[in-house]
Amino acid sequence: MYLNDLTWEEVRDYLTGKDGLIIPMGICEQHSRHLPLATDTLMAEYMAGYVAGATGVLVAPTFHYGVGTPCDRFFAGTTSISYDDLRNTVSSLISVWAGQGFKKFLLMSAHGDPIHLQALRDIEHEGVYVLELFALDVKDILEKQTHVKHADEGETSVMMYLFPERVRTNRIEDFETPEEVFKESLFHENTDPITGSPGCEGYPSYATKEKGRRIVELMKENALEWVRGCLAE
Ligand SMILES: [Zn+2]
């Protein structure tokens, strides 16, 4: 069920039995030459819909913006908000909902930027729970990588499985940022574009639909367990 589809009376009735609200956290960010800017948003929305269907928890309208790495801002279309803006805006939204009886705010993000996640974790004391969807052990699923990076073997596999029509397979290319620059970029210390990068980090040419299916199964299992755990607290 989606909050925006209900009337205020229907939401009030929901609150007589439940107090949870799932919020899909998106971002408008380049995902190399082969995936759309909405990639992380689409995956968060998909998983929010899945756990909502399994638990009956309402899904809030997607929050479409987040904190991205400075070096991604050179790619057309990408945008970002600041740490404080993300933290304060989400906090404002939930404080109004909290006043009506919502108590648990389940934020799901496929965007794994550490600064983005920290901004959300900063408000955990307000009943906010944060799930990083790709924080999974996928080393036995992936061939070329040990964990999921960006527009890579992992993310591209998931997109091939969930939204095949959105993957420009003929535009896939691999790219690995030199280790030193990668860490600086990840933690936003490097603000320059990465030389020669098409926008991905890793090996999307190794992506397959079957790997995507296995990752999605794992993600679903993990997300469901997480939601049930949060609700039980
Ligand atoms: Zn992504």
Image: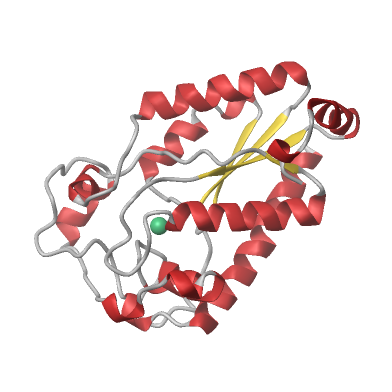
Q: Quadrant of residue 198?
A: bottom left
Q: Is residue 3 above or below residue 43?
A: above
**Is residue 119 among the parts visible in the rendering?**
yes
Q: Is residue 151 above or below residue 112?
A: below
Q: Quadrant of residue 196?
A: bottom left
116 displayed left or right of 13: left
Q: Quadrant of residue 181?
A: bottom left
Identify the residue at horizontal 44%, vertical 50% (top origin): 111
Identify the residue at horizontal 52%, vertical 67% (top origin): 137
Identify the residue at horizontal 43%, vertical 58% (top origin): 39
User: Can you give x and y, in whole percent of width and height, for residue 169 in the image?
Assistant: 35, 79
37 displayed left or right of 160: left
Q: Is residue 203 above or below residue 210?
A: above
Identify the residue at horizontal 49%, vertical 34% (top origin): 120
Q: Which corner quadrant of the figure contains ligand 1? A: bottom left
Q: Nearer the viewer, residue 233 or 80?
A: 80
User: Can you give x and y, in whole percent of width and height, for residue 91 in the image?
Assistant: 54, 23
**Is residue 110 among the parts visible in the rendering?**
no
Look at the image and tell me in which quarter the C terminus lies: top right
81 displayed left or right of 62: left
Q: Nearer the viewer, residue 88 or 146?
A: 88
